[in-house]
Image: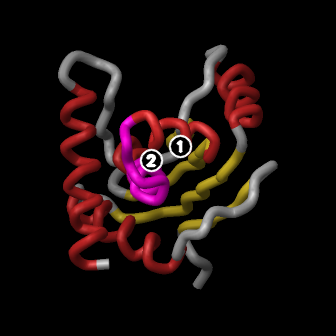
Amino acid sequence: MDKMIQWTSQEVEFPEIDTERLGQWLEAVAGRHNRIIGPMTYIFCSDEKILEVNRRFLNHDYFTDIITFDYTHGRRVSGDMFISLDTVRTNAESVGAAYQTELHRVIVHGLLHLCGIDDKGPGEREIMEQHEDQALELLKEEF
């Protein structure tokens, strides 16, 4: 059986992550939200690439850490997530977090979007951060 989660990079070196461990963690996080993992692809890229994706598909003219394309059907989460490693590094430095921790936060952020958690409306950012923190705690404790 093919792996449901694919990991790749464009225009950047692939980050030092344990994809097997992170895949198990993401499955557990999805399960806690009554979801199952379907086909997902994480694409690690540069600021330039994510800006290109943002302009082309969303008509947004700014850098961001992650863009999530949601193909979820019912409980089966599925999507493509572009993650700018440049922005992840900048954000980690600005909040005083370890790069690896910030990268894990952004990785799970994409999954949480696929689980139906938003972060744009009033109060939603705090709810998203709460779910991210819970997921990061799970990663530390069990994976």
Amino acid at the residue labelled 2: Val
Q: Secondary structure at mark 2?
A: helix
Left or right of 107 in this view: 32: left
Viewer-proximal residue, 135 or 77?
135
Quadrant of the snapshot with the N terminus: bottom right
Amino acid at the residue labelled 1: Val
Instruction: Identify which residue is drawn at 36% across, 64% down.
Output: 36
Instruction: Identify which residue is drawn at 62% across, 47% down.
Output: 85
Instruction: Identify which residue is drawn at 52% across, 76% down.
Output: 18
Report the residue marked by disc 2.
Answer: 106
Q: Secondary structure at mark 1?
A: helix
Residue 86 is situated, as x and y percent measured from the top left of the image, at 63, 41
The verdict on residue 101 being magenta is yes
Quarter of the view holding residue 32: bottom left
Start-end of magenta stretch: 95-107
Residue 61 is situated, as x and y percent measured from the top left of the image, at 66, 14
The verdict on residue 106 being magenta is yes
In the picture shown, does residue 93 fall above or below 64? below
In the picture shown, does residue 62 fall above or below 39? above
Q: Which mark is residue 129?
A: none
Report the residue marked by disc 1.
Answer: 88
Farthest bottom residue in view: 1
Q: Earlier in the sequence, mark 2 or mark 1?
A: 1
Residue 142 is situated, as x and y percent measured from the top left of the image, at 25, 78
Q: Are marks 2 and 1 in contact (CB under 8 Å)?
A: yes
